[in-house]
Image (tube, rainbow, N blue to C red):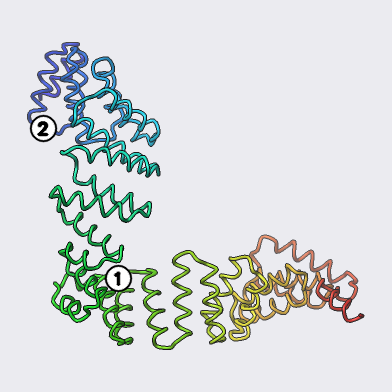
Amino acid sequence: MSIQIAEQYEENEEYEKAFEEYKKVFDQNPKDMNVIERLGHLCMMLGNKDEAAEYYTKILEFDATNTMVYEQLMDIYQETDRFKYYIHRGNLHSIEHKFEHAINDFKKALLNTQDEKQIITTRFVLASLYAQTGSNTKAIDEYLRLTEYEEIPNETYLLLAKLYMAEDAILSAINVLERAYSKNIETENVREMLAGLHLKNNNPQKALEVTNDDLMKAKCLLECGEEDEAYKILEQTDAKNKTTAKYHSLLAQYHFIKNDFEKALSEVNEFEKLEKNSPLTYQMKALIYENKKDDYNAHINWGKYNIVRGQTDIAINEFLNAFQIKEDDIELLTTLAVMLEENGDKNHSMEFYERIAKLEPNNITALSKLADFRNSIGDYRAECDYLESWYEVDKRNYELIKRLAKSYEKLRNKPSAVEFYKKYLQVATTANDYEEVKKHLAKLENTEMAEEEEGLIDKIMRFFNKK
């Protein structure tokens, strides 16, 4: 085979013959990366740097992250073409995630060219690097410089508009996309983004003039107060649109405007199936329940809405308002207990765990939380009460049994401590500390113990009772 002949020529340092043989293989299979790499290497050996660059560039078409190729191209262009040298060095730094170095390389590349196409390509990459590193203002400046040229990528306008939106400069974003329109760049993305921006800017009529999308038209008509026209579009839209979350949200909005709250709620539920945990779900439900005069569910959904938005304090306040209306909803009580604890209000949290324990005496989570809390404040008698309740639900939990034994021992309640140590030995026969506990129990049984020790809370209460 030619490749074996080529390798033999190369081994014999007959590089020109090796090159010709590798060329034959390349002509048969122009995607063989190994052959392309060998051709590039042989061109370098033969002093044909321009041809070597062509082969190395072909490798990048298949593998744009090949660091060896960028290094070879940098060697080729270091003395002959500083623009290409800095471009390849910038690409190398990019794939190595050294973005600040890459930015400096592309800026140096710009200083080494007057070619318009090279300038456009380099500024486009430079703008994307600025955006990637969070330097939105510098990215915007680069995209604006690009718009001074005629032959620029259409994405320039979209990317620039998105950056303006990220900076809350909606009018600037609209202006950019309208400039794209003036240049006859009317791609679907440009058109629909512009329509969305007009709608966001409270100009639904302008958005309606721009959009070609059925669902956007329906949204604009709803915002313009033309509900029946919007509904006609929703009824007639294609089957594909009817499977989207947006379709159901628009139907929900239509039924809400028409005061048909049950149908609106049904459509919100369909929306929720397609768009999990969206803040819009809870916002729509909250508004529907408010109009149905169902304050409890309105507060619940405003709470969920604010959780998704990261507004924990507001969410807790909404849930507390719901609690004032309904005090026995276990799910709500659990939500409040967890959120208050996570928010650092442990005392308040325990009030809700207390309520849960009263409503569900077998709720292990509530019992364990309450036991831990009582332990933390020195109320050991109450801790044991909760541990005992927990034990009634989970009698094979040997770690719990041992904790009870230790807690009673701490209270100097020898009979109860001995009882639970014995229970521990009955159920924890394979535990690593079995023998140790057995010895401890034997010692405890032969030890005189004073009366049960008061916990911190007991001492405090006794002190106040004396007053």
Alpha-carbon span between mark 2 and mark 1: 47 Å
Residue 152, picture quadrant: top left
Against 142, residue 290 (above or below) is below
- Measuring 16% from the left and 32% from the top, which residue is drawn there? 32
Kind of residue at badge 2: Asn
Q: Earlier in the sequence, mark 2 or mark 1?
A: 2
Q: Is residue 406 left or right of residue 358?
A: right
Q: Is residue 279 left or right of residue 425?
A: left
- Measuring 19% from the left and 67% from the top, which residue is drawn there? 208
Q: Position of residue 196 (x, y in %)?
A: 26, 62
Kind of residue at badge 1: Leu
Q: Is residue 326 left or right of residue 294?
A: right
- Measuring 69% from the left and 70% from the top, which residue is drawn there? 373
Q: Secondary structure at mark 2?
A: loop
Of the two numbered discs 2 and 1 in the rendering, the one whose residue sits closer to the viewer: 1
Q: Position of residue 88 (x, y in %)?
A: 28, 27
Residue 368, picture quadrant: bottom right
Q: How many marks?
A: 2
Mark 2 residue crowding within 10 angstroms, few (<14) / some (14–19) / many (20+):
few
The quarter in which the N terminus is drawn is top left
Q: Secondary structure at mark 1?
A: helix
Against 160, residue 9 (above or below) is above
Q: Which residue is mark 2?
A: 29
Against 197, residue 243 (above or below) is below
Q: Position of residue 195 (x, y in %)?
A: 22, 61
Residue 241, picture quadrant: bottom left
Q: Which residue is mark 1?
A: 274
Callouts 2 and 1 close, C-beta under 8 Å: no
The quarter in which the C terminus is drawn is bottom right
Q: Along the line of sight, which residue is nearer the eye, 442 or 216?
A: 216
Q: Along the line of sight, which residue is nearer the eye, 46 or 343?
A: 343
